Image (cartoon, rainbow, N blue to C red):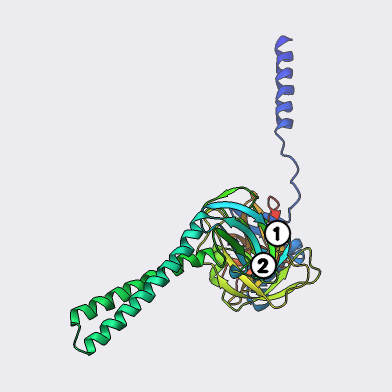
Amino acid sequence: MTRTLLMGLLALSAAGCTSAAAPSPTPERTAASPQKDGVIQLAEASQAFVAVTPVQPDPSGALLQAPARVAFRDEAVSRLAAPLAGRVVTVHVRTGDTVKQGDALVTLDCPEAAAARTAVATSGAALREAQSAFERERRMFDQGVSTERERLAAETRLTEAQAELARAQASVGFVGAGGGTTVVLRAPLAGTVLSRSAAVGSAVQPGGEPLVEVGDPSALWVVAEVFERDLPQVREGARVKVTLPSVHAPLEGTVTSVGAVVTTGSRTAPVRVALAETPAGLRPGMFGRVRIDAAEASLTLPVEAVLLRNGKESVVYVKQDERTFVRRSVVIAPPVDGRVQVIAGLTQGEQVVTKGALLLDGAADQLL
């Protein structure tokens, strides 16, 4: 009886184990099945949702896009500092004032100015005396009364007096017109007072910080910061379209120069753009973006063809045969008008998935 009961329990246990080990139902087919890392087999039913396009150079897509700012031209800003040590007597302008060329900006009292002006007068008198002495020695030499040595000595003194006067005039040129210890700093160009640090009574030193800064608001250009990798595509004379949030219509311009030095941190170089027309209200410091015609047509793709893996790797899927697609890492430029320039990773003519790329890679994200 006991043996019969034990055999029955063993039979029930075996039946339970057999039931637990039974295979689960077969899962439904997915749109794409990975064969190995980066290779995808597309289900036949999903082929209608995937579009493939050969990669070709796109002349209309040969554009570079970069951030930009409006800035003064190099010759349009003047920073005036004190030419000599002294003290500020009068400040004639305020920040924002409009000035004409030659207008007085700051009046200084500089003791060295009086010495410089006196040196000019002294050197002028010495030159006149040396000139008279030389003429006298030359006449005496022609009459046989003076010697060649005396005539040469008089000529040497004349040359030294001329050099001393030139030096004194050059020194007083920094001081400017006027008399005594008064020095007046005047606007070297017409424009607007951008900044003013001069204050009445403050002491100044030559080579110190600028007392007044004047800029010509009509002499502006646009400076674009172009990435190092894109610089070979930029040429002087290239057409540029500038977009500024504060200006309703895009501005047209051309590239006038490409910076020779790349900034260490941002890895960009300045590209200066001359505008065909300067609209009213354009001010230095405004920010915007530029689109620059590249030197040659480049390979481009629609933005939806590029996927992001792990948040940083840009990939596309290249068609290998009728149903097989291979993942390919690519290097791209920033998107422009819904397209991206392919810098590296693809060659002309390769078949790339341009629609339905997410069906092939559910773990990736769309670029935009």
Q: Work out whether residue 274 or residue 125 is closer to the camera in this orientation and state it.
A: 125
Vertical position of residue 313 compared to residue 214: above or below = above
Q: Work out whether residue 100 or residue 256 is closer to the camera in this orientation and state it.
A: 100
Q: Is the residue marked by circle 1 packed among few (<14), some (14-19), or many (20+) residues within 10 Å?
A: some
Give, as a three-letter code, the residue at label 2: Asp
* Distance between mark 1 and mark 2 Cα atoms: 10 Å
The quarter of the displayed image where residue 73 is located: bottom right
The x and y percentages for residue 87 are 58, 51
The x and y percentages for residue 246 are 79, 64
On screen, residue 3 versus residue 151, left or right, reads right
**Residue assigned mark 2:** 103
Q: Work out whether residue 363 or residue 207 is closer to the camera in this orientation and state it.
A: 207
The image quadrant where one finds the C terminus is bottom right
Residue shown at 52% from the left, 52% from the top: 205
Q: Residue furthest right?
A: 248
The x and y percentages for residue 10 are 70, 20
Label 1: which secondary element:
loop
Residue shown at 65% from the left, 59% from the top: 41
The image quadrant where one finds the N terminus is top right
The quarter of the displayed image where residue 60 is located: bottom right
The quarter of the displayed image where residue 215 is located: bottom right
Say whether marks 1 and 2 touch (CB < 8 Å).
yes
Q: Which mark is residue 200?
A: none
Give, as a three-letter code, the residue at label 1: Val
Mark 1 and mark 2 lie on one chain; the one further toward the N terminus is 1
Q: Which mark is residue 93?
A: 1
Label 2: which secondary element:
loop
Whether residue 158 is visible here, answered yes or no, is yes
Whether residue 207 is visible here, answered yes or no, is no
